[in-house]
Image (tube, rainbow, N blue to C red):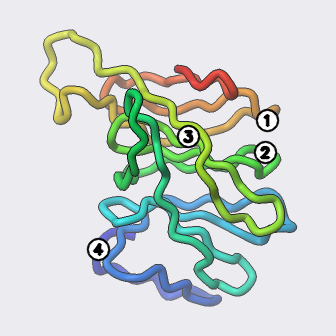
Amino acid sequence: MSDNQTLTPAGKIIELGSPVRAKSIALNPNRNANTGAVLLMGSPQPIIVFNTATGQVLQRFIPAIMKGAALTSSRTGSFTGIAYSPDGKRLFFSQDDNHVVIANVDANTGLLTNGESVTLPEPPADGRPYYKANAINPGGIAVSAEGKRAYVVLNVANTLGVIEIGRAHV
């Protein structure tokens, strides 16, 4: 929900903390873990992992990514774009600083550890003005049934990127 909006659920409310802007959610298909992940925008941490049975927040995840030869933290969750792989071993999520993070998921706990980051191409040099001249603004993500490809909406360019899993390129 956007800022200062409330839903009154039939079940329980999971308190994510404040201030956060929860923008998208994914449920882990690995039922043993009983976890889900929420993508946040404009927050000190882009991902919150929670227990789907108890509602307890289990982790506030800040991915470390490679920028050239340097390892840095990314705190720029996107407006949308989060999905688990079909086996629940990876979590994919969009980042506003022009990449997609592929985090590893512990099969027993559902907690995240650093995996890969995929840098996306810059917007096309076609003369159009862009809000962020060097960012394609990734959005929604879907993972293929066999888990070999992830599809990410490249919002600024009105195109779809295909990420080959394990090859970490678009």
Q: Quadrant of residue 125?
A: top left
Under tag 3, what secondary structure?
Answer: strand
| Front one among 76 and 3 | 76
Tell me the kind of residue under disc 1. Ala
Residue at 55% across, 84% down: 14
The residue under label 2 is 86
| 3 and 4 marks in contact (CB < 8 Å) | no
Under tag 2, what secondary structure?
Answer: loop
| 2 and 4 marks in contact (CB < 8 Å) | no
The residue under label 4 is 3
Disc 2 to disc 3, C-alpha distance: 13 Å
| 1 and 2 marks in contact (CB < 8 Å) | yes
* Residue 148 vertical placement versus 92 (above, below): above
Q: Quadrant of the N terminus?
A: bottom left
Residue 168 image label: none
Tell me the kind of residue under disc 4. Asp
Q: Which residue, as the protein is rendered here, is positioned at the far front?
A: 69
The residue under label 1 is 145
Residue 141's x, y, as percent?
55, 40
- The residue carrying pointer 3 sits among few (fewer than 14), some (14 to 19) or many (20 or more) residues within 10 Å by Cα, namely many
Q: Left or right of 21: which side holds 64?
A: right
Tell me the kind of residue under disc 2. Pro
- The residue carrying pointer 4 sits among few (fewer than 14), some (14 to 19) or many (20 or more) residues within 10 Å by Cα, namely few
The residue under label 3 is 141
